[in-house]
Amino acid sequence: MALDLYLHPRKTILDSLRAPDHAATPARQRAQRKALDALLARHPECTLVGDPLRGRVDGFMGELTVHPGYLHWCLHGDVDTDAVQALVEAFEADGWTCTDPQDAGFGSEARADKRLADWDELIGAEFVGLALQRDWGARVVLDFQFADGRPVRLDFMHFGACQLPELGTLLQARLVSVTHEAGKFDSVSMVFDNGQRLAVEGCVPNGGVIGARSRRR
């Protein structure tokens, strides 16, 4: 099975770069030459065959072909996921991004942490654990995980009360509903698929963060 990854400058749209009438601007051409120079410096065993805008890189893992505005990276057979991830991160450090059409877990957007946009996003998440902290007063941190491996962390500050069920009943329990009551101080109530309820009352929610999903092995 082949894995196709596309590397292109940050804030560019891959479909536009691949359009037949696309022409890379002089600035984009310079950026691409700079990225290829950095790649060849990191991997002296590799050589560029052809032009920095139309060519290929020999000696690289898989097949890396060069197009105006983007690079197409094709890998066959068993893939060393850690090595691929390290190479993608090196491109990201140079200001590029990775588009992963097969959703194999290497795309820059899929790996980026995201803020929780709506409490209902939590439905289906599995309880992982909690921590009580004395950071800026009373604070409780709740950890969950989605079925695809993405971790979720909720942070509640200055809470007045925290209603907890028997903690053992939360192991492997999944959220089926979340109710948020806003006010001077907020309250958030969570109900799990086994009927148990966890509530944080009189708090200041400091938001939630959804982490990167696990890569497919």
Image (cartoon, helix red, strand yellow):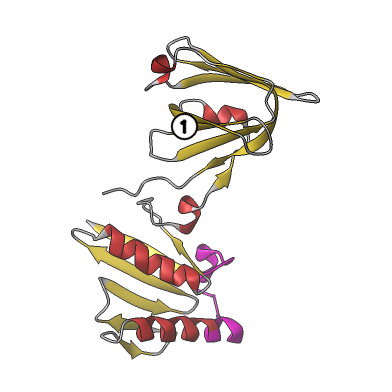
Up/down of 21 relative to 149, above or below: below
Mark 1 highlights which residue? 144
Residue shown at the point (53%, 29%) measured from the top left: 122
- Residue 19 in sight from this viewpoint: no
The amino acid at mark 1 is Phe
Element under disc 1:
strand
Nearer to me, 78 or 154: 154
Up/down of 25 relative to 148, above or below: below
In the image, taking residue 176 as reference, residue 180 lies left or right, namely right
- Residue 23 in sight from this viewpoint: yes
Nearer to me, 21 or 121: 121
> Residue at the right extreme?
184
Nearer to me, 143 or 58: 143
Up/down of 164 relative to 87, above or below: above
x and y, in percent, of residue 67 in the image: 43, 78
Q: Residues within 10 Å of mark 1 (few under 14, many from 20)?
A: many
x and y, in percent, of residue 88 in the image: 40, 66
Examine the structure image and report whether residue 147 is included in the region drawn in magenta.
no
Nearer to me, 102 or 81: 81
Residue shown at the point (46%, 80%) measured from the top left: 35
x and y, in percent, of residue 118 in the image: 63, 33
Q: Give the range drawn in magenta.
A: 9-30
